[in-house]
Image (cartoon, rainbow, N blue to C red):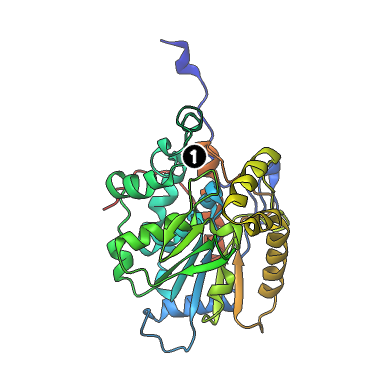
Amino acid sequence: MRASAFRGFEADPLLNVAGADGAPNGAPSAPQDLRHHPVIAAIHERAAQRSRPGARSDGRRIALVIEGGGMRGAVSAGMAAAIEQLGLLDAFDEVYGASAGAFNAAFLLAGQAAYLAALYPHGFGNPRFASALRVLTRGRPPFDMDYVVEHVWREQRPLRTERILTSPIELHCAATDAHEARAVDLAELASDAEIRTAMLASARLPWLGGPPVRFRGRLLLDATLAEAVPIEAASRAATDLLVLLTRPEGVNHAPLSSWVAKLTDRYLARINPKLVDLRMTRSERYDRLIAELTARAADPAGAPRLCIIRPARGTPVIGQLESRAGALLNAAGHGFRAAWFAFAGANPELLRSLRAYV
């Protein structure tokens, strides 16, 4: 018998180890039970009445708003998977996503939220999308989302865009207009090509992800340059907003490392110097926005009504360039658990299990 047979097994990262009132052994505290919140209550009421998008009788318009943040989007992907498994998608009238949040929004509307959450730990389905060698040997960007969206999510791990096109729930992808240096809302996506291009635009990291994406006469970059959480567009028509955030409460935005910031600013300045200002003020604007959203969520009389689901306090925070499969799986699990607890008031038991997707 080989000695390797006696190696210890790896711990299950999805095993719930937090108690109801605390976090033993450094584990995160229990997520929030939000069933009392008027937005969550309205979603449950619609589900109980089997209300369908486009055939409402309650006079409300409920929007789901999904934050991304590169690979930290695994957190909100897990949250979207919980909404999917709880059967609550039809309670929403529109879904907004920024950056990787746009990916999560699209897969949710395609009925594939859990599918995407399982792909994050493997580089969105194929680890070839990230390569430092491309920079060193070919002078190309290290992250090739075109390869993911146009090849992996079409041929290997297909996104069912036909389901998005026939869904009565509207998909909105946020992006940054490079010439105007402001957030824009990409909506009324009428074809497979438009959906995929809008997703690419929403997550086009400056310098790291390639040149701006051209769409409908605009040059577009990653949404988070202008607005990490697409709340402005969602607030125009919605009476109720459910916002999925990827950081626990109290965790501030982390700025880029100095060398990445320098290269990014040099790149942005060639396109539009105003984009450099957006990049430099991004952390400050993000923290201010989250504080504002937190205050609004605590005010049940606010209009539109707003509810936030986020990871529990003490949850490990992953970066936007995280590549460790275990960390990404864990992040998705924390997101799933936070959303499930918010809606059901109980911790789900999570397992990595084989499942066929068709």
Q: Residues within 10 Å of mark 1 (few under 14, many from 20)?
A: many
Instruction: Using the image as rendered, state which of residue 12 and residue 256 is in the foreground.
Output: 256
Query: Residue at 36% of width from left, 68% of height from top?
Result: 189
Q: Which residue is mark 1?
A: 141
Residue 58 percent coordinates (x, y): 46, 88
As displayed, is residue 134 above or below residue 50? above
Q: Is residue 357 left or right of residue 274?
A: left
The number of numbered discs placed on residues in the rendered structure image is 1
Q: Is residue 14 visible?
A: no
Instruction: Using the image as rendered, state which of residue 154 and residue 4 is in the foreground.
Output: 154
As displayed, is residue 91 above or below residue 181? below
As displayed, is residue 222 above or below residue 126? below
Query: Residue at 56% of width from left, 77% of height from top?
Result: 235
Residue 111 percent coordinates (x, y): 35, 61
Q: Is residue 266 left or right of residue 80?
A: right
Query: Residue at 44% of width from left, 42% of height from top?
Result: 144
Amino acid type shown at disc 1 = Pro
Q: Is residue 276 visible?
A: yes
In what element is the residue under mark 1?
Answer: loop
Q: Is residue 53 left or right of residue 231?
A: left
Residue 269 percent coordinates (x, y): 62, 51
As displayed, is residue 153 above or below residue 306? above
Q: Quadrant of residue 55?
A: bottom left
The outermost residue toward the front is 270
Quarter in which the N terminus is drawn:
top left
Residue 146 percent coordinates (x, y): 39, 47
Instruction: Using the image as rendered, state which of residue 62 and residue 330 is in the foreground.
Output: 62
